[in-house]
């Protein structure tokens, strides 16, 4: 089993808020009167979500006053430091095409607070969209606990949002600092030139470390000898918590890279000058700044990466 070690790099800077922009105000979730009063407060704002898309402009996330919010299932996101409440509404009505964006397409326009709010709202809305009925009896469910549960209208059972742990890893070749290379892969569903770090879900009965070693070996045929935890990121597609690592490949693994041909169809080692050149000419596109994959890559690189066309 690969051993754990101190992280050889730090994650690159995050566009998401390191401090949550809201107090989640969990004490209000069971108080229907308090929730109704919070909705009626003059300063209350609402993130509107439809099938994972929200209102976003080049100025950032659009929050509408509560009286202007559309009909839909309502969730309390929390309260701002100044005290005003923020809700999300999952509306069944499509949003205006020119203003509706998902997290990936809106990444370039979002501040740290906006990104955190949109991740929060999107994760809840997608879970509610996908769980309209009770898994026990099939009866309809309704929103409970201010959006953090659904209650069966038939048997009263409560169901809660799930979070699926997934590993995401930047593999390096173990050469001396500054001369080492990183390994990036391209998924089968991606167009040519789109590369990212390796990732996969933790399976039942498996530790995170076991999952990391298994995924890297399965996807590209590389054995890792050590790994180091770097950070995490919620990723609501649909309900993942990405656990980010750096890992060091076994000596000689650069010669044994074998994409599995199913999830990963291309895998390449990059040194720093080679990656810069590939980005400059548009041969390679890297993940958006919103993603922890980009932060892993920039942590290894030692600073920001300029991409002609970061993929969304």
Image: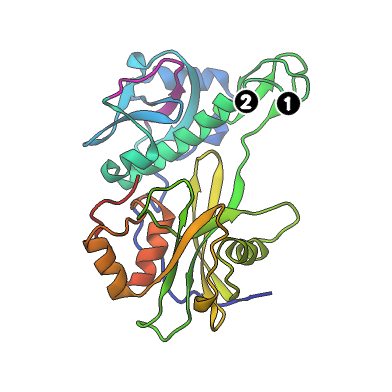
Estimate the x, y position of residue 103 in percent, counting from the top left. Answer: 38, 39
Is 184 contained in the magenta span? Answer: no
Q: Residue at x 32, y 55 (%)?
A: 285
Is 89 contained in the magenta span? Answer: yes
Residue nearer the viewer, 80 or 14: 14
Asked where in the image residue 180 lies, by quadrant, the reply is bottom left
Q: CA distance from mark 1 to mark 2?
A: 8 Å
Q: Mark 1: few, some, or many residues within 10 Å (few <14, many ≥20)?
A: few
Q: Is residue 304 visible?
A: no
Which residue bears the numbered disc 2? 131
Residue at the outermost bottom position: 176
Secondary-structure class at tag 1? loop
Asked where in the image residue 210 lies, by quadrant, the reply is bottom right
Marks 1 and 2 close (CB-CB < 8 Å): yes
Estimate the x, y position of residue 55 in percent, counting from the top left. Answer: 32, 28
Estimate the x, y position of residue 29 in percent, counting from the top left. Answer: 57, 28
* Numbered mark located on residue 310 in the image: none
Quadrant, the N terminus: bottom right
Which residue bears the numbered disc 1? 135
- Position of 254 relative to 209 (above/below): below
Residue nearer the viewer, 191 or 5: 191
Q: Is residue 299 left or right of residue 224?
A: left
Q: Residue at x 22, y 62 (%)?
A: 280
């Amino acid at each position: 089993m690969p051993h754990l070690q101190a992280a050889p790099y730090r994650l690159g800077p995050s566009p998401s808020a390191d401090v949550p922009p809201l107090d989640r105000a969990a004490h209000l979730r069971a108080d229907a009167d308090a929730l109704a009063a919070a909705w009626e407060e003059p300063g209350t704002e609402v993130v509107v979500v439809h099938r994972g898309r929200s209102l976003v402009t080049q100025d950032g996330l659009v929050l509408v006053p509560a009286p202007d919010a559309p009909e839909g299932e309502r969730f309390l996101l929390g309260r701002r430091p100044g005290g005003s409440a923020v809700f999300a509404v999952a509306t069944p009505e499509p949003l205006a095409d020119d203003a509706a964006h998902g997290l990936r397409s809106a990444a370039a326009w979002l501040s740290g607070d906006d990104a955190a709010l949109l991740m929060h709202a999107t994760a809840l809305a997608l879970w509610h969209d996908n769980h309209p009925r009770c898994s026990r009896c099939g009866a309809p469910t309704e929103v409970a606990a201010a959006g953090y549960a659904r209650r069966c209208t038939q048997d009263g059972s409560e169901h809660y949002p799930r979070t699926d742990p997934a590993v995401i890893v930047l593999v390096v070749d173990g050469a001396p600092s500054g001369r080492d290379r990183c390994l990036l892969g391209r998924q089968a569903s991606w167009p040519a030139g789109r590369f990212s770090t390796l990732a996969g879900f933790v399976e039942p009965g498996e530790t995170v470390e076991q999952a990391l070693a298994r995924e890297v070996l399965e996807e590209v045929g590389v054995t890792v000898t050590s790994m180091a935890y770097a950070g995490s990121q919620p990723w609501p597609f649909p309900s993942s918590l990405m656990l980010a690592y750096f890992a060091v490949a076994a000596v000689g693994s650069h010669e044994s890279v074998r994409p599995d041909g199913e999830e990963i169809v291309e895998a390449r080692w990059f040194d720093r000058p080679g990656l810069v050149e590939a980005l400059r000419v548009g041969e390679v596109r890297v993940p958006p700044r919103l993603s922890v994959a980009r932060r892993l890559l920039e942590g290894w690189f030692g600073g920001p990466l300029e991409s002609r066309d970061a993929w969304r």
